[in-house]
Image (tube, helix red, strand yellow):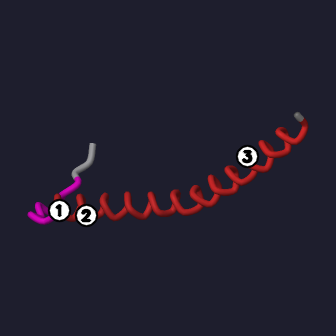
């Protein structure tokens, strides 16, 4: 297939681990921040709808 360490660099595994860790953190932050806002908006909308439904009873 392909070789992740073609030059035999002894630090390559650590570099890959750090790269994956940083990428995972950035991906989490990129998804978490907009998602947190969306959840907050949806909770507000749910509370509003719930209060409207209680008003009809």
The residues bearing labels 3 and 1 have C-alpha atoms spaced at a distance of 46 Å
Counting from the top left corner in percent of width and height, residue 54 is at 83, 39
Residue 6 falls within the magenta-colored stretch: yes
Span highlighted in magenta in the image: 4-12
Counting from the top left corner in percent of width and height, residue 40 is at 64, 56
Quarter of the image with the C terminus in it = top right
Can you tell which of label 3 and label 1 is closer to the viewer?
Answer: 3
Residue 14: give its label. Answer: 1
Counting from the top left corner in percent of width and height, residue 25 is at 38, 62
| Image position of 47 with respect to 54: above or below | below
The residue to which callout 3 is attached is 46
Q: Quadrant of residue 20?
A: bottom left
**Residue drawn at point x = 24 percent, y = 60 percent:** 16
| Image position of 42 with respect to 12: above or below | above
**Residue drawn at point x = 17 percent, y = 58 percent:** 13
The residues bearing labels 2 and 3 have C-alpha atoms spaced at a distance of 41 Å
Quarter of the image with the N terminus in it = top left
Residue projecting furthest to the right: 56
Q: Residues within 10 Å of mark 1 (few under 14, many from 20)?
A: few
**Residue drawn at point x = 79 percent, y = 50 percent:** 48
Q: Are marks 3 and 1 in contact (CB under 8 Å)?
A: no
Magenta span main SS:
loop
SS for tag 3? helix
**Upstream in sequence: badge 2 or badge 3:** 2
Q: Are marks 1 and 2 in contact (CB under 8 Å)?
A: yes
| Image position of 13 with respect to 56: above or below | below
SS for tag 2? helix
Q: Is residue 41 left or right of residue 57?
A: left
SS for tag 1? helix
The residue to which callout 2 is attached is 18
């Amino acid at each position: 297939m392909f070789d992740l360490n073609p030059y035999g660099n002894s630090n390559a595994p650590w570099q890959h681990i750090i790269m994956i860790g940083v990428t995972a953190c950035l991906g989490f932050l990129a998804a978490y921040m907009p998602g947190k806002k969306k959840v907050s908006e949806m909770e507000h909308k749910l509370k509003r709808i719930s209060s409207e439904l209680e008003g009809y009873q």
